[in-house]
Amino acid sequence: MEIITKSSQQTQNLGEKIGLDLKPGTIIALSGDLGSGKTTFLKGLAKGLGIKKRIVSPTFVFVKQYFVGKINFYHADLYRIENPKDTQGLGLKELFEDPNGITAVEWAEKFPEVFPEETIKMNFTYLNDKERKIVINNYNSK
């Protein structure tokens, strides 16, 4: 599926819509250059999950965890990770296996081999100051 959003608000709205649809155990791998809309999308996704806290990229802490009801939302960022072995230290495998978890990972293109086959893959492309192209694979909405 390919979607063009024409504003950051539309990118957030798409995230919110998808967030409303997700089930525990979902893993989302987000790829794309700086400024392509990954974090903006995740702000909306978190809102769709019911998370009220401010969402920012965990570039320096690598993983942030948010709780909403019985769901654990994990937001990871691989931007500063240099070696696939370093992903083990982040506990990604454990996050992926959390039956109550929804995990979203920015900069997933750096280490595609760490993601299970059923991962929803999203690629964000900066088109211009307002527009983003978002390609989504492995996602079936209700």
Image: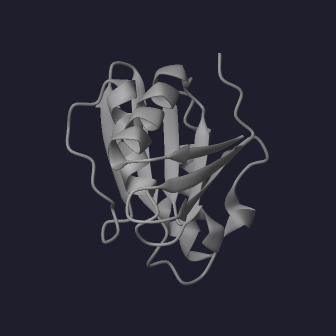
Position of residue 20 measured from the top left corner of the image (x, y, whole percent):
46, 21
Residue 47: quadrant of the picture: top left
Residue 54: quadrant of the picture: top left
Question: What residue lies at 62% left-to-right and 76% top-to-bottom?
Answer: 85
Position of residue 103 measured from the top left corner of the image (x, y, whole percent):
51, 43
> In this rendering, is residue 22 above or below 128?
above
Position of residue 93 measured from the top left corner of the image (x, y, whole percent):
61, 52
Question: What residue lies at 50% left-to-right and 34% top-to-bottom?
Answer: 101
Q: Nearer the viewer, residue 17 or 100?
A: 17
User: Dividing the image into 4 quarters, which one contains the C terminus?
Assistant: top right
> In this rendering, is residue 111 above or below 19?
below
Q: Nearer the viewer, residue 97 or 102?
A: 102
Q: Is residue 138 left or right of residue 59?
A: right
For the view shown, which residue lies furthest in the left direction? 53
Question: What residue lies at 32% left-to-right and 25% top-to-bottom?
Answer: 68
For the view shown, which residue lies furthest in the bottom direction? 82
Q: Is residue 27 left or right of residue 130?
A: right
User: Dividing the image into 4 quarters, which one contains the N terminus?
Assistant: top right
Question: What residue lies at 70% left-to-right and 34% top-to-bottom?
Answer: 139
Position of residue 91 measured from the top left corner of the image (x, y, whole percent):
51, 57
Q: Is residue 100 left or right of residue 59?
A: right
> In this rendering, is residue 44 above or below 34?
above
Q: Nearer the viewer, residue 47 or 24?
A: 47
How are the colours assigned in the image?
Answer: one colour
